[in-house]
Structures are given as structure tokens and as C-alpha cells.
Amino acid sequence: MFYFRCESRVNGDPLVVVITRDSANKKTGDMLQVWILPLESWRTTLCTTGNCGSCPRGAQDDYRYRDFELRKCYVQWQRAPLAIHRAYHRGAYEIWTGNAKQREALGGDGRPVRLGACGDPGVLPAKVLSRFIAQLATKNVTGYTRRWKARGTVYLRSVCMASCDSEQEQFDARSLGWRTFRARRKAERILVSELMCPASEEGGSRTTCAKCLACGGGYRELLLSPDRVIIEH
Ligand code: SF4
């Protein structure tokens, strides 16, 4: 498929962003997947501060944020992300320019896109991300960011949910103007502003993200569309 390179807005590390067309993920369904990875091939982990920011579930190259016992990263880095990273370094992907031929190869304009199949979309420079989304010519975008507390991330609110792990975080993110996606423990309550994710097991696995598309951030939706919640797995 396609890739482009940029620098992390968190620490300037070189990143490679890969766009794949087909997804085996039953929950997300048929969406373009955007993988945000460190560029270097020598790394022993693909979850770094450069591509994941200071996510408390990851940032495994930064000891300050190690928190493996409490919360685990959702991404199985040794599986698809590693395969994609290796494929990139083998030269399997074409550089992304966003031309009509490439968009056609991705299934045509308007296809749903999942930002951050791995990595945090909030590490991409604002101009890079907005140009990329404009090139994809779609309004159907979902994304999640742990960088909702960081300065200068307001632009992300239109495409990403604030990823939260507690009621307090949900409250804080909401106060800052974000829609939220919260991972709760089974015993924890669902808040009045929240709806259960309909693609989750507890939500009855009734749909996929490609059809639901509720997790696309948004300003107008802040008032109209409730936040989403899922039991963490
Ligand atoms: S609420 Fe909708 S878009 Fe969000 S994770 Fe669940 S199914 Fe996907």
C-alpha cells in the first residue's frame, strides 16, 4: 500500500505512516487503516514516545510512563504493526502523494478511515494530518488520542476522541471540549453522557466502526452525540 514520512511533533523523531486498505479487524470492519510507526528498523519496540506520545499504556522507551501492571496497551505490536514495519523496510509500499490513481487503489474517495491502527494521531504535525485527511477526500474518519491534554492539539478534536481511562479523565476531557472514548472496568458505571460502543461484546457486537463512525470527534457532535464507553479487554 502507501506510506509517507514525517517528524513526530512530540520529540522530532522520524516516523513512517503506512496506509493499508484491507483490515482483518472484525470490530472496525472495512476501513482504511493508518499505522503510525517509528522509522528506524533497529528498534526493539515499535511503541515509542515519538509515535505514541506519553500514553500511560505505552511509551515503552520511556521508563517514566511504564505502567504495565495497571493498564495494558491494546495494540499487539508484535503482530500486524511489526509485519507492516518490516514490509516498509523491504520496500513493499509506494510513497503516498494522494493522486487519483492511489486513491482509487485505496477503494475510492469517501472510504472510512481509522487513524492510529497503532500509534497516536496526535503525534502527527497538524499540517501533515490535515493535508492527509484532505487528500483522502473522506469525512468518515475515526481516531483516538491520549494527547488531549497536550497544548496545541485543538485541531485534533474534529477527528479524534479523547481516550480516557477514568471518570475524572472523562470529565477533564469533556471540560476541555473533547468528545470522549472511555475504557472502563466492568464494575465501573456508565456516565450519563456515555453510550456503550455497539461493536463491543457488551454492546452486543451489533455493528462495526466502519458503519457506526461515532468516534470521529467533532464540535457539533459534542452536544448532539454522546461519548462512548467500552469495557476494557
Ligand atoms: S462507538 Fe462506533 S466508532 Fe466508536 S469504537 Fe464503537 S463501533 Fe467503533
Image (spheres, rainbow, N blue to C red):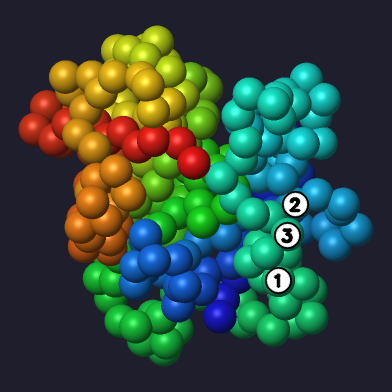
* Quadrant hosting residue 180: top left
Which structural element holds mark 1?
helix
Q: Nearer the viewer, residue 196 or 134?
A: 196
The residue at which mark 3 appears reads as 78
Q: Position of residue 73 (x, y in %)?
A: 61, 40
The residue at which mark 1 appears reads as 83
Q: Nearer the viewer, residue 175 or 155?
A: 175
Which structural element holds mark 3?
loop
Q: Is residue 233 left or right of residue 204?
A: right
Residue at 43% from the left image edge and 18% from the top image edge: 166
Q: Is residue 133 visible?
A: yes
Other residues around mark 1 within 10 Å, as few (<14) / some (14–19) / many (≥20): few
Which structural element holds mark 2?
loop
Q: Is residue 137 visible?
A: no
Q: Position of residue 194 (x, y in %)?
A: 21, 28
Task: Determine whether label 2 and label 3 are within 8 Å by CB.
Answer: no
Q: Which mark is residue 46?
A: 2
Residue at 22% from the left image edge and 60% from the top image edge: 207
Instruction: Indicate which disc, 2 or 1, sits on the residue closer to the N terminus.
Output: 2
* Quadrant hosting residue 36: bottom right
Amino acid type indicated by mark 2: Leu
